[in-house]
Amino acid sequence: MAADLVLALLIVGLTAYAVLGGADFGAGFWDLTAGGAKGGARVRGLIKRSMSPVWEANHVWLIFVLVILWTCFPPAFAAIMDTLYVPLFIAAVGIIFRGGAFALRGEAATIGEARALGAIFATSSVLVPFCLGATVGAVASGQVPSDDALGAWTNATSLLAGAMAVVTGAFLAAVFMAGDARRAGLDDLVRAFRRRALGAAVVAGALALGGIAIVNADAPALYDGLTSGAGFACVIVSGLGGLATIGLVRAGGWSSARFTASVAVGAVLIGMAVAQRPDFLPGELTLEEAAAGDSTLVVTLISAAAGLAILLPSLALLFRLTLTGTLDQEFHPIGDEEAKR
């Protein structure tokens, strides 16, 4: 029972990071594809304005997941780190460089520095979610443990999961920022991010449909879990959430679209976790075999309850202040003309 509750906490943390951290990385994807210094200046300005109040808070969920994993499921943590150290190392370095570049870009002394920092931020915003998605895909497809540090995360299912992580993050970011643009009265950017949201939704849907055949061929156990029982229910919920989001985006219902987009993305991750039961590492460790002793699990549950009692109201307040405009910064396009002030 304690192991199931801790696993539920782990899934909650992963889902929160996939949604909030995913949107954070997705903003960097749109920075990368915004265009030249002049054409992309307004898009990059909105990205900075939207991310500034919340970007650091979003990554608290990654720390939460790592602590739960290494404390409560140490055999699984060891196997994952031994097998998938390459993508996890790339992701860790990318997060560090990305955060530094985002914080320093506005303080660049020259145009060259501004361009270099922007390139680091945008490139890391694609590499990090891809590597984290590939890690999840490797675990779900039964590639852990393995002595093949490269092949374990470059199989078809892992690459599909990495691509899905990038695309769904871009989808979430476009939906969130279109709402921010509406609140700021930036109608041109509302239209720009509406197009981006709809385009990302189409790509995500195409990847999901095409991925069915890939998962069936590459990870049949995962495919069976996702096409039956609770796993299939999660897939249906995700599809309905995606369709609802498309309708809301077209109608301009941005507040509701944020929720349905989050459901669409979160349901996929939950479905993958449900599809693996009763295994924690498919074909290697069951949940009971992966779990630490009951005393560790109980203490973790108590500690997590106390921590979440502080964390959740704090995050709710932060997002409420952000969405009501209290923490809004003045909008400034980011282009070559502002690289040196």
Image (cartoon, rainbow, N blue to C red):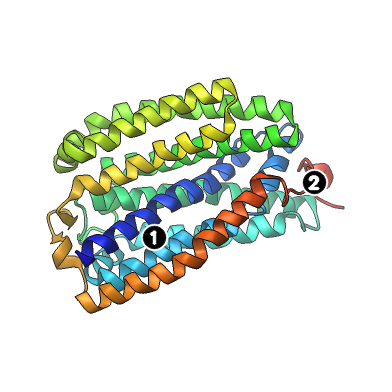
Q: Quadrant of the N terminus?
A: bottom left
Q: How dense is the environment of label 2, judged by Cα within 10 Å: few (below 14), some, or many (20 and up)? A: few
Q: Tell me if mark 1 has few (under 14), some (14-19) or many (20+) residues whose alpha carbon lies within 10 angstroms of its own.
A: some
Secondary-structure class at tag 2: loop
Which labelled disc corresponds to residue 30? none
Could you tell me which residue is drawn at 71 percent across and 54 percent down?
105
For disc 1, the marked residue is 88
Between 282 and 250, which is closer to the camera in this rendering?
250
Query: Against 113, is 248 above or below?
Result: above
Q: What residue type is disc 2 on?
A: Glu
Residue 175 in which image quadrant: top right
* Upstream in sequence: badge 1 or badge 2: 1
**Residue 144 location, x and y as percent?**
21, 57
| Residue at x-position 73% and y-position 42% | 45
- Viewer can see residue 224: yes
Question: Looking at the picture, how far across and down is residue 134, in whole percent?
Answer: 34, 48
Of the numbered discs in the image, which one, if any, rests on residue 330?
2
Q: Does 266 sit left or right of 126 as displayed? A: left
Taking the image as shown, residue 21 lies to the left or right of residue 4, namely: right
